[in-house]
């Protein structure tokens, strides 16, 4: 994985101590941008989920240089997501709302370079998660 570790870690450090606020804003953006995803979380303990989501971002950033850890963990996370009813098409939706949240937290530090670093990182994360997900071909054909 060739990612801009310095920019990713530096920008993440700016939100790391505001994890619960960040995760709350992320889900609020996600459900505003894509209300059709909200029913998937109907039985979810959202406070727990916000923590899990943010912990997974911490894990990614902490392991940017440990490809084996990232690969194993994210493929496993991708396998679980099949059971949650997540399809490949949902990944860009989550990615868009996540980037929007970063933009709002980082303000003027959300430079084009930082944005590109996060687009690349999210793409790599989603790709690993999808590698761990065994979708039937008809579901994969919905990917865009
Ligand atoms: C980079 C992408 C993503 C990351 C890092 C991520 C992270 C996580 C984590 C850490 C969990 C908790 C797993 C556990 O309990 O062991 C989870 C659960 C879940 N995620 Fe994601 N996720 C991603 C993408 C998506 C997408 C695209 C969707 C589609 C809407 C989604 C919907 C869900 C749902 C419905 C659950 C289950 C909540 C429950 O337990 O009730 N996630 N996710």
Image (cartoon, grey):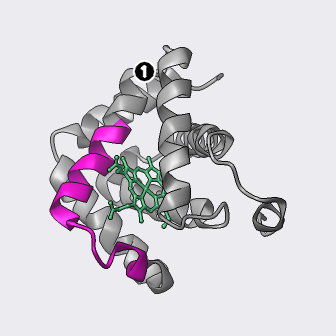
Residue 57 sits in quarter:
top left
User: Ligand 1 shows up in which quadrant of the image?
Assistant: bottom left
Magenta residue check for 50: yes
Magenta residue check for 25: no
The one nearer the camera, 128 or 65, is: 128
Give percent across and percent down for residue 116: 60, 42
Q: Is residue 131 left or right of residue 64?
A: right
Q: Is residue 137 left or right of residue 74?
A: right
Q: Main secondary structure of the magenta part?
A: helix
Which quarter of the image is occupied by the N terminus? Answer: top right
Give percent across and percent down for residue 59: 35, 30
Residue at 31% from the left image edge and 73% from the top image edge: 28
Residue at 54% from the left image edge and 16% from the top image edge: 68
Give percent across and percent down for residue 61: 40, 29
Q: Is residue 57 left or right of residue 141?
A: left
Q: Which residues are magenta?
A: 38-57
**Badge 1: residue crowd in 10 Å (few <14, some 14–19, many ≥20):** some
The one nearer the camera, 74 or 99, is: 74
Give percent across and percent down for residue 97: 46, 65
The one nearer the camera, 88 or 144, is: 88
The one nearer the camera, 24 or 139, is: 139
Residue 91 sits in quarter:
bottom right
Residue at 20% from the left image edge and 66% from the top image edge: 45
Query: Which residue is labeled 1 in the image?
Result: 63
Vertical position of residue 26 compared to residue 7: above or below: below
Which quarter of the image is occupied by the C terminus? Answer: bottom right
């Amino acid at each position: 994985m060739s990612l801009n570790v310095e920019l990713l870690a530096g920008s993440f450090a700016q939100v790391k101590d505001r994890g619960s606020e960040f995760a709350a804003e992320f889900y609020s953006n996600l459900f505003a941008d894509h209300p059709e995803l909200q029913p998937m979380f109907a039985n979810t303990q959202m406070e727990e989920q916000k923590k899990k989501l943010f912990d997974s971002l911490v894990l990614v950033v902490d392991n940017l240089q440990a490809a084996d850890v990232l690969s194993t963990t994210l493929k496993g996370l991708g396998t679980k997501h099949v059971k949650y009813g997540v399809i490949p098409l949902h990944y860009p939706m989550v990615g868009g709302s996540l980037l929007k949240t970063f933009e709002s937290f980082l303000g003027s530090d959300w430079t084009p370079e930082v944005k590109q670093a996060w687009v690349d990182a999210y793409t790599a994360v989603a790709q690993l998660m999808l590698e761990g997900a065994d979708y039937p071909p008809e579901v994969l054909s919905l990917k865009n």
